[in-house]
Amino acid sequence: MNDFSFNALTPDLILDAIEALEVYPTTGLLPLNSYENRVYQFGADDGKRYVVKFYRPARWTDPQILEEHEFALLAKDAEVPVVAPLAIQGKTLHCYQGYRYTLFPSVGGRQFELDNLEHLEILGRYLGRLHCLSAQQAFEHRPMLDTQRFLFDAKTSLLKSDLVPSHLHTPFVTILEQVINKAAQKYKVPKTIRLHGDCHAGNLLWSADQLMLVDLDDCQQGPAIQDLWMMLNGDRNEKLVQLDTLLMGYEEFMPFDANELALIEPLRAMRMINYMAWLAQRWQDPAFERNFSWFATDKYWEQQILALKEQLAALDEPSLSLFP
């Protein structure tokens, strides 16, 4: 199978894979918002709701997926509220007709509110507890959040795709290379820990008044600030208040190195560029062309040139600092 081989993942195959685990759906399969993998919610004859996740072929190795599962289960056992995979028939990772998949308990809830300082302080506590645990040991198989993968490799795959319009190619590549070089220069990481890796509001849910961290699919080794910076939004003063609130909870469990604040803008640049490359790499998947049709328009690339210029300026600005 190649990276895009979800075509054979029919509803019948999905149901057969679930029933192979002696879990018997009694409802239809509700697709959940995931493009990288294929994820469905359903109810079963035991009265419980489940989520089944089929991993995109060839993206992760079995040891990398199992290390994700082990990390989630370790956090859950330490009472950090993460949605962890279910062990069924003694395993968390299963295979059916070439597709690897996992079952999770279904957790519904309302979305995390970025502008709610009480929510931010609670999240800070949970991330502090998670990082206190994760700093005790490094990942062996999961990747490192580094500039090679997120900047230089991303640039290579992006430009190889031929999706950048020819008349915008020169201005786009010029600003892209400037941002990459500046971000790589500024991304100096003295210490890394195991991370959630993709901690944004869409991966946080309030379920029965309990904040839950979901989707560790991008867990990786990197600086602690990676799990914090995406919670900061608005102008500089608003970000400072949000940061202070997050760290108020975080530092109850884990000390924070203020030097990592200088990594926020390099990390933002890495996320921007890697996101473009991710779309380009997955463009052969029909789901991407259908749901991200704007990616192939001139307007999108014009906007990216402007966004990269703004990011280059942000890389030259003084980093955030903690309140005295």
Image (cartoon, grey):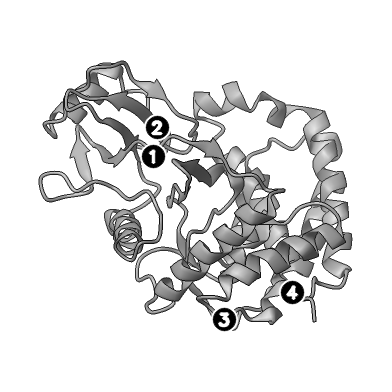
Q: Is residue 158 left or right of residue 168?
A: left
Whichever of callouts 2 and 3 sits on the residue coming sooner in the sequence is: 2
Q: Secondary structure at mark 1?
A: loop
Q: Amino acid at mark 3?
A: Pro
Q: Amino acid at mark 1?
A: Arg
Q: CA distance from mark 4 to mark 2?
A: 36 Å
Numbered label attached to residue 143: none
The mark nearer the N terminus, 1 or 3, is 1
Q: Which mark is residue 56?
A: 1
Dot 4: few (<14), some (14–19), or many (≥20) neighbours within 10 Å? many
The residue located at (40%, 53%) in the rendering is 82
Disc 3 marks which residue?
A: 255
Q: Nearer the viewer, mark 1 or mark 4?
A: 4
**3D distance between C-alphas at marks 1 and 4:** 34 Å
Q: Position of residue 261 (x, y in %)?
A: 72, 73
Tell me the residue at 37%/48% (across/down): 83
